[in-house]
Amino acid sequence: MARGFPYADLNEFLAALQRAGDLHHVTVPVDPHLEISEIVTRTVRAGGPALLFDRPTRGDMPVAINLFGTERRMAMALGVEHLDEVGARIGELAKPELPVGWAGIRDGIGKLMQLKAVPPKRVKSAPCQEVVYKGDQVDLNRLPGLQVWPEDGGIYHNFGLTHTKHPETGKRNLGLYRLQQHSHNTLGMHWQIHKDSTAHHAVAERLGQRLPVAIAIGADPVVAYAASAPLPSDIDEYLFAGFLRGERVEMVDCLTVPLQVPANAQIVLEGYLEPGERLPEGPFGDHTGFYTPVEDFPVLHVECMTTRKQPIYHSIITSKPPQEDHGLGKATERIFLPLLKILIPDIVDYDLPAAGVFHNCVIVSIRKRYPKHAQKVMSAIWGAHLLSLSKLIVVVDDDCDVHDYAEVAFRAFGNVDYKHDLLLTEGPVDHLDHSSYQQFWGGKAGIDATRKGPAEGYHRGWPEEMVMSPEVVARVDKRWREYGFK
């Protein structure tokens, strides 16, 4: 708590960024039509700070953006020094060992106390409902939504946390989806085929029911991250957020739909999807670096909008990497490593390169123990939740740093006989993938860049990689300045 975490809301996080010298106020008027996008893109690629546009030329509130654009800010958002710390906490909780002795019992109690703080709690009143607009009062033009790229289909709201419930089980889902503004009170819901909200909507349509939806904009940074996390459908995102925060997330009942939203959000939109209704959505310049095509998607009719008295609008820019979503993707990579290692114990470490937009490529290291071990790991990754969408898997030995792309390339380019070490298959790909010849599925490849042995048909005797003797390295280190180097 001395470090200002957990942050009660977006305002507290922005204040912490300000104190850390990692927030820049843009005080002159700036157009949400393309101009904000260009400023943000330049800032991200320069490794620059979070931004607060105080005077956007459209809408009634400032725009906060690039909040998660560096690993440092992402770690700060989650209240840690390094992102691996969160993964380590999850790994400890996930350990299946029974307690041994007093120390084991004490550790077990500690784990239970962590979980006790997890469930969200309901409150009767909330800052997000200080101002209420209903019916004809609803006007989405109050929000400074962005047009990010010239050929986008219009204004988009890119960090709306979307809440739905399964119509039969009541199971809640929180997701992060782009929202195209069709009119002053309607939004296009870009719900990709693999997402849980799509399944909720399909059930509602089968039952001939309207689906209630609530969208929260400007939640605290932990809840904002939790909405983007690739959690299994049976894990509540607010339980996960409570675990990350170390305290329960406060939730409030919506005014017009049977859903709950984070009480400390800046803005909430409430409404319904009518069964069978679709409108063209797109094009949209996505994180792939390409415009995604126009497709028909469900339409949200916003019947109520609530805000704080002085709300801040939170958004994000999508584009060819590097972009702000690098911080979110890197957090997911590090946080979920311990769980992935439980599912696939063969894995030592993995990396999801930003240039592969986090699902086109997986680099994984293993401690190889038997022939075709790498191919076994490839198959396991293609069966692991949303990693099933990965198109390329590169497997290296455990002495290779998966985050050192030059070293990975050295192994992948030099350790591979593509007749024997290349695995080609096909399977599901991301909804946004433009390269597959059919939508939703396409070709995949696995590259075995590990050392090969006789049991795999390699009988030439794998050569030893050159490594300088430690004695010489130490001697040169000691005399480095004598050689005239600084």
Image (cartoon, rainbow, N blue to C red):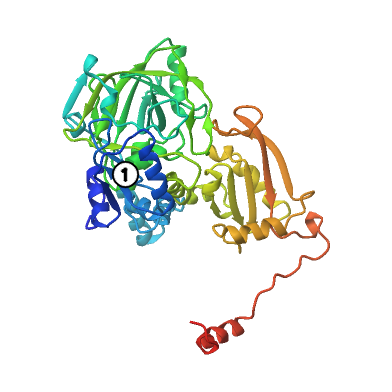
Q: Amino acid at mark 1?
A: Pro
The reply to whether residue 474 is in sight is: yes
286 relative position to 304: left or right: right
Between 96 and 405, the one nearer to me in the picture: 405
Q: Is residue 322 above or below residue 185?
A: below
Q: Is residue 50 above or below residue 256?
A: below
Residue 172, position as x, y percentages in the image: 37, 28
Q: Residue furthest right?
A: 459
Residue 157, position as x, y percentages in the image: 36, 31
Q: Residue at x 58, y 81 (%)?
A: 473
Q: Residue at x 51, y 21 (%)?
A: 295
The 10 Å Cα crowd at callout 1, few under 14, some 14 to 19, many 20 or more, is: many
- Provide the residue designation for mark 1: 221
Residue 219, position as x, y percentages in the image: 29, 38
91 relative position to 469: left or right: left
Q: Residue at x 75, y 59 (%)?
A: 452
For the N terminus, the quadrant is bottom left
363 relative position to 463: left or right: left
The reply to whether residue 316 is in sight is: no
293 relative position to 438: left or right: left
Between 142 and 228, the one nearer to me in the picture: 142
Q: So how many labels did they put on this image?
A: 1
Q: Residue at x 34, y 56 (%)?
A: 80
Callout 1: helix, strand or loop? helix
Query: Which image quadrant is residue 21 in?
Result: bottom left
Between 193 and 239, the one nearer to me in the picture: 193
Q: Residue furthest bottom?
A: 482
